[in-house]
Image (tube, helix red, strand yellow):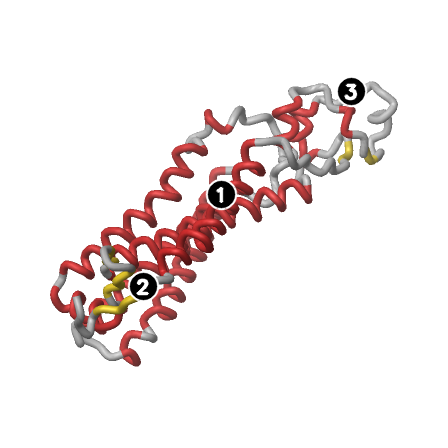
Amino acid sequence: MASHNTLRSYSIIPCFIFVELVIMSGTVLLAYYMECTDLFSVHVQGFFCNDAELMKPYPGTEESSFVPPLILYCVVAAAPTVIIFIGEVSMYVMKSTREALLAQEKTIVTGDCCYLNPLIRRIIRFIGVFAFGLFATDIFVNAGQVVTGGLSPYFLSVCKPNYTGTECRFNHQFIVNGNICTGNPVVVENARRSFPSKDASLSVYSAVYLTVSRMRLTLWFLLSEERRESPDVAPAFPLRSAVALISKEHAGEEIQDKEREES
């Protein structure tokens, strides 16, 4: 298979197995230990017994929330993966983008038997980068929660300190003793992992990656079909971002006005 669209490489498979796969495995393993084990203990942050900001009612377990974590994490992981897969397959199927793709990406011949066409390489590359970033975000969020020990707004409702004891006798006494809580230890520990928010962090990462992927596909389609030049397309992205931010601020103000009227 000798042509100008073919590139022979004997290092791509070993590099993938012994470097990229090892790094990815280590990242997944570290995320597992931080997520599913008690290997890393949460920092015990002090509090005031009568802090009104920590006395919100306990909303229940996360599984009983409007959007359970399992569903949220599945959407966060699946949405960009599906979009990347559909986008790359569409680029490869369409004739105009296929020609531009083959001109940029070479078919890799590794050894004497294996061929890696641009479609397979690009799907593995972009989904792999997304998955690595997702696990890395989870690691940083868990590390932040373990180090800071941020208290949830309902912390005192689940901690259930002994208000008649010597520690809580005075309203302005700062409590640093972690053993003062009489509530469920598992629930109390989860209430100490408020900052940073894992749901918000993973959702924002997924949304940003998905947005960048869509922008990249849009730019590729426009330029490959020669309908637009790069200077014509470039201003569209900051313009769209500015409009989105203005719309978001306007919508937020309307929501706040409605809440004031209802209250």
Residue 28, numbered label: 1
Q: Which of marks 1 and 2 is in front?
A: 1
The residue positioned 72% from the left and 19% from the top of the image is 182
Instruction: Decide which of 210, 128 is in the foreground and name it.
Output: 128
What element does badge 2 sit on?
Answer: helix
Mark 1 to mark 2 CA distance (whole Å): 28 Å
Q: Residues within 10 Å of mark 3 (few under 14, many from 20)?
A: some
Q: Nearer the viewer, mark 3 or mark 1?
A: 1
Numbered marks: total: 3
Q: Quadrant of the N terminus?
A: bottom left
Mark 3 to mark 1 CA distance (whole Å): 41 Å
Image quadrant assignment for residue 99: bottom left
Which x, y percent locates residue 54? 67, 33
Which x, y percent locates residue 180? 78, 24
Q: Name the residue under label 3.
A: 162
Instruction: Decide which of 225, 200 is in the foreground and name it.
Output: 225
- For residue 200, above or below residue 2: above
The residue positioned 45% from the left and 48% from the top of the image is 134
Contact (Cβ within 8 Å) of mark 3 with mark 1 = no
* Mark earlier in primary sequence (1, 2): 1
Amino acid marked by disc 2: Met
Determine if residue 257 is in view. no
The residue positioned 23% from the left and 64% from the top of the image is 107
Amino acid marked by disc 1: Val
Q: How crowded is mark 2: few (under 14 residues within 10 Å), some or many (20 or more)?
A: few
Q: Name the residue under label 2.
A: 215
* Mark earlier in primary sequence (3, 2): 3
Residue 68, numbered label: none
